[in-house]
Amino acid sequence: MLTDVLLPRNEWDLLSGYPRQKPTVTVVVTHFEQHHLLGRMASALQRQTLRPSQVVLADDGSAVAPAFAVPGVETLVVTQPDEGFRAAAVRNLAVRHSTGEVLVFLDADTVPEAGYVEGVVRHIGLCPDVLAVGRRRHTSFSRLAEDEQPQDVDALEEPPWLLDAYATTENLLNADGRSFRFVIGAVMACRKELFLDLGGFDERFVGYGGEDWDFAYRAWNAGAVLVHERTAVAWHDGPDWGGRGDSTDVLDLQSARLAAVIPEPGTRGAPLAGVVFDVLATVRAEGSFDRMVRTVHSLLRQDHRDLGIRLPVDDKRLLETYEGVVRAEPWTEDQERRARVHLAVHGPLPVSAVHRAVELITQSDVGRVDLVQEGELLAVAWSTRAVGRARRWAHCFERHEVLQRAFSIHRIDLDASDERSRTLEGFFSSWR
């Protein structure tokens, strides 16, 4: 039995007083045409201080099927056809064959030190919400014998942006909504139950890069706890991608792909008229046709522009008015998981109301915000992150209890409305 601790926000340092656990571990090694490195990987996995119970080599369509075995450890090789770079799909395939409580992801060219597995699962064994990232260092394997461990003198430069990020966030203790960019798929680990709750890697990612940041974004947005396990070191053969001098086009494609599916403003750059929104607003207003129109229009006027609107009514007059602008059908699961905020709207909102709620939720890791005007509850904003954590803890706690224990509930008192138009014509004309 692993220890299950419900943490507040991202405060993984609170686990320091708990005894270490020794979970069963499946190591997933992603591979393509790197047969010459497999002997080194097998040797490294065999000497782990916490030996994995299973190793699955995930082969992304090598021309010759790899032969791979870790002595004394159950070893499987799974493969898929070569249809381009499909790390997301082949990792998912490997997980479907996994038996461990914890999944540790490595790439064939990223070889762990002897204490890596034990180090990277340290906090995962105590909290089911932890998504851990180890420390990837860089060297050239060409100078080393197959069973030789890299030393500091062999090291190439580590990416300064990543070192700075871990230092600034105190190894992700102070992570925020953009910290998913500091999770590297080649040195990543989590419980299998968290992986399955997230739906695994998004197999729409074909081509180099992005699938790990997308996974980490969805994990954070579902209430995961991000941890950088600095003592869990694995060595990558060669420099960081950014130091290879030929990465601009690939990184541009990656950035565009991420912008399409991650609505976080610093990743997206501008609201996109696609199907993934930052805020999902569902109109719950009741009453007259006039009040419904004012409520929907107030959402269309919001300062926060990356916003989708759902109007779940059968009123043909309303649906005709807002055809092509709002939707009547339910949100898709992908939309629900990727939006950072869900908004239930009961009445017309001031133009800055959504922005204020989103800012409070995303900057202070708040679980719920009530928007109140002159004593009337006009909207409730839910953090997708808080809802996701509550979903995984539903077997122990009610949602409200998770919100109180792990996040918090706030109230924003909105300014009194100065809109006094009795007709919709007057209301419409007041929009400047």
Image (spheres, grey):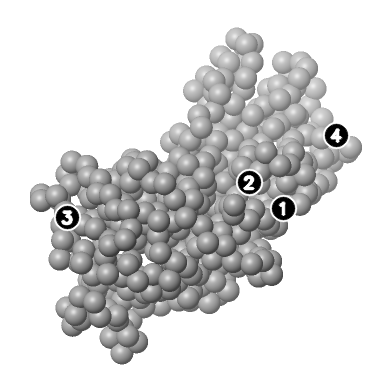
Report the residue marked by disc 4: 376
Disc 2 from disc 3: Cα separation: 40 Å
- Looking at numbered disc 1 in the image, what kind of residue is underneath it? Ala
Is 279 situated above or below 312? below
The residue mark sitting in front, 2 or 3, is 3
User: Regarding mark 2 in the picture, which secondary structure is present there?
Assistant: helix
Disc 2 from disc 4: Cα separation: 29 Å
Marks 1 and 4, the one that precedes in the sequence: 4
Residue 428 place in picture, x, y as percent: 67, 27
Disc 2 from disc 1: Cα separation: 9 Å
**Pointers 1 and 4 in contact (CB under 8 A)?**
no
The residue mark sitting in front, 1 or 3, is 3
Q: Quadrant of residue 199?
A: top left
- Looking at numbered disc 2 in the image, what kind of residue is underneath it? Arg
Residue 43 appears in the picture as rendered: yes
Residue at 37 percent of width and 57 percent of height: 27
Q: Is residue 144 left or right of residue 19?
A: left
The residue mark sitting in front, 2 or 4, is 2
Disc 1 from disc 4: Cα separation: 27 Å
Query: What number is the disc on residue 67?
Result: 3
Query: Which quarter of the rendered picture does the C terminus lie within?
Result: top right
Is 111 situated above or below 257? below
The residue mark sitting in front, 3 or 4, is 3
Disc 1 from disc 3: Cα separation: 46 Å
Residue 97 place in picture, x, y as percent: 35, 43
